[in-house]
Structures are given as C-alpha cells and as structure tokens.
Amino acid sequence: MERSGTRGAAFALAGLGVVLVAVVAVTTPWRVLADAPAAEPDPVRDFSAQEIARAQAFDLATSVPSYLSLGVTLLVAGVLVATPLGARLLARLRGPWWLRTLIGVVGVYAVSLALKWPLGMWFETVLRDYGLSTQTWAAWSGDRLKNFGLQVALSAVTILVVVALARKWPRRWWIPASAGAFLLTVGLSFAYPVLVEPVFNDFTPLPAGQLRDDLLAMADRDGVPVRDVLVADASRRTTALNAYVSGFGATRRIVVYDTLLKEPPKETELIVAHELGHAKNGDVLYGTLVGGLGAALGTCLLFLLAQGLRRRTAVPALGDPRAAGLLVGLISLGTIVSGPAQNLVSRHIEARADAHALELTQDPVTFIAMQKRLATRNISDLTPDPLEYVLYVSHPTAPQRIGMARSWALLNSAEEP
Ligand SMILES: [Zn+2]
C-alpha cells in the first residue's frame, strides 16, 4: 500500500481512540446505585406467565425480519467494500463527477430500500397482529419513503463532500473531513427537533390542566428550566407509550406521546421525571459531543480502510465517483459496528435517569407500576438473549429497571415495593 497520508491518519485515529475511550470510561455512570443492596431482575415476580409468553412470542416474530434486514445491510455493504461490483457499475455512468457520485449514492440506497421493503412489511404485519401499529399501508409507505429521503440526503451530502475533499487533497482529506464529521453531528443533533421531527409528527403544547401544572411544578422543584412539555401525535402510528428529550440549548424539548395522556397521571409524571434526569445531566449534549468524537474517529478509519480497499474494489482514487459505493459500504458497516458500544453507554445513562426519577419523586411504587405498564403495552423484551442485548437494547430491561427501584427503596429504607 502506498504511503498516501496514512501515517498521519493512523496517528489521529489512535489519538482520538485514546481520548474517546478515556472520556467514555470516566464520564459513563457505570454504577448508578453503588451502595445499593442488589435486587436481581426477575420477570416472574412482576409479570404473569401469559405476559412473559406474549413478550417472547412477539420477540420471536419480530426478530426474524429484523435479523434478515440486518443481513441485507451487511450483504450490500459487504459486496461494496469487498468486490469491484460497485465501481464497475458506476464506471458506466457519464457526466460530471458530482452527478455520478450522487447517482451512485442514491442507487445503493434504492437497491437496499427495495430489498428491505418486503421485510419491513413483514415487521409491520407483526406489529398489527399484536395491536401495536395504527397505520394504514399508505401512511406506512409514506413514512418509509420520508425516512429514505432523509437518509439519502444526509448520505449524499456526506459522500459528495468526502469525494470533493479527496479530489482537492488526496492525502489529507481526512483532516477537514474529520472536523466536518464532528460539526455535522453537533449541528444535526441541535437541529433535529426543528428540522426532522416535524417531518413525522405534529407537536402541540400539553393542554392546560392538572397534569401540565404538576409536570411544570416538578420540573421547577428539580431546578430544570422547562418552558413547555410538548405532545407528539404518536397515536397516528402506534399504541406504544413513550417520552423523550431531544435537542440542546435553544432546541431542547421534552416530548410525551399522546398515547400517554390516557394513562394514570402519576405514572406519566414518573416518565417525565426520568426525562428531567436526562435534561438535568445534559445527556443529549453529552451524547452528541461523544458521538461527534466518534464520527471524527470514524472518518480517520474510513480514510485508512478506503485507501486499503481501493485495489480490491477497483476504485482508482477516492476522489473518483467510482468510490461512492465503497464509501457508502464502509459508513454503513461503521454504523452497525458502533451500535453495541452506543447501547452499552446508553443503558447506563438510562439507569442514571431512572435513579433521578426515583430521587425526585421518592415513589418507587409508582415507578414499578409505570415500568410494568410500559413493558406490557409496548410488549418489551423482558429477557433478551445476549446477541439482542448487545445489538439492540439501549435501555435496561423492565425487570432490571424494576430491580433497581427495589434496590433504591432498600437503600433509602423505604418499604420494599
Ligand atoms: Zn431515557
């Protein structure tokens, strides 16, 4: 392999790797209730045999199309990074470099969308069978196409910028590209609530009344400035219950699904108390900055791997439009490979938000009732197998969260719920 700037990129990769691992190791709340007596998660204690069986059946039914879809992603990416097929197809195109690059990116995504469409329909059919989806096929297709459009637009901009930089600085493009990846991550996370979320949902302020007063009073008591709690019209898509915090600074917002408004207000209060924990700890900003570091690191790795795979994939130079497939394939694999690390950190951050909710409300009994309701209504996996846990599970499981509430109660000498 020729020495085309690979030394500098390798040093940057190692440096960023050390920084990222150190930051995550130091700032992740690995042990949330350090002194707590352990309460082992035990689904049998809190869920009926019927509920457990239903969750297992649902998990089995959804995991088949999920794994097949992951398989398609791996297959498409594998072909693009390990064979010359992508470059050979792109070599047939004529026109300016940017147009050929754009067609390459859109083409790869379109093939992937077409291959995954029936798997998506399969998954949606399972959701309907279990009463979780409220969508028509037209609305479902619209959602999917909107998602596709957003993904293609983001990916096209990224790849066009990379190819443009590689044309200008074939050996050093990883430097501006890494800085760009960091800034893009931060910018997207900031703009997400105002640019992306409204594409899929309408948001309205929580109507005046007891619940709104109670939630704002709780935020006030918590010392978290919250101007408003927004309600998303999630019921147009799902019967699932959820809430989240997104954005930071001027775009930060706490959102509850409209499906929650029919549930007991005390439990909704506990869900919002969890979200206040995220807001108070600045979890979105923290995740964004760590994600930005990861994106910069990933860009150095992209440079090194793409250089190394050029010959195998018949890509003459990364500034050539024929590199589009290789770059898309590598980014797609990078996203999959980084998932387990993100989930690992996320599960601990979620546990800290749970602990915050318990501290703020001092109400482990309602906390447990809320976790049971969330798990049964959303048909959560109560006992994910190790592979699922690593690949997909971003929150502690319901039995783990309930176990933690019992530990908290013991630690705070409340009666064990
Ligand atoms: Zn959370």
Image (spheres, grey):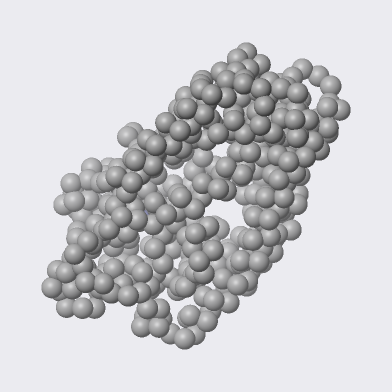
| Residue drawn at point x = 62 percent, y = 20 percent | 4
| Residue drawn at point x = 36 percent, y = 69 percent | 400
Image spot of residue 377 (x, y percent)? 46, 71
| Residue drawn at point x = 49 percent, y = 43 percent | 197
Q: Quadrant of the image for the N terminus? A: top right
Q: Is residue 63 left or right of residue 351?
A: right
* Total labels drawn: 0
Q: Is residue 141 above or below residue 305?
A: below
Residue 408 picture quarter:
bottom left
Q: Is residue 37 above or below residue 268?
A: below
Judging depth in this view, the residue of 47 and 90 nearest the camera is 90
Q: Residue furthest bottom?
A: 49
Image spot of residue 48 (x, y percent)? 43, 85
Judging depth in this view, the residue of 209 and 224 nearest the camera is 224
On the question of residue 106 being in view, the answer is no
On the question of residue 58 being in view, the answer is yes
Q: Quadrant of the image for the C terminus? A: bottom left
Q: Is residue 33 above or below residue 288?
A: below
| Residue drawn at point x = 51 percent, y = 50 percent | 339
Q: Residue furthest left?
A: 413
Q: Is residue 215 left or right of residue 383?
A: left
Image spot of residue 216 (x, y percent)? 23, 51
Q: Residue furthest right?
A: 92
Q: Is residue 217 above or below residue 321?
A: below
Image spot of residue 350 (x, y percent)? 35, 56
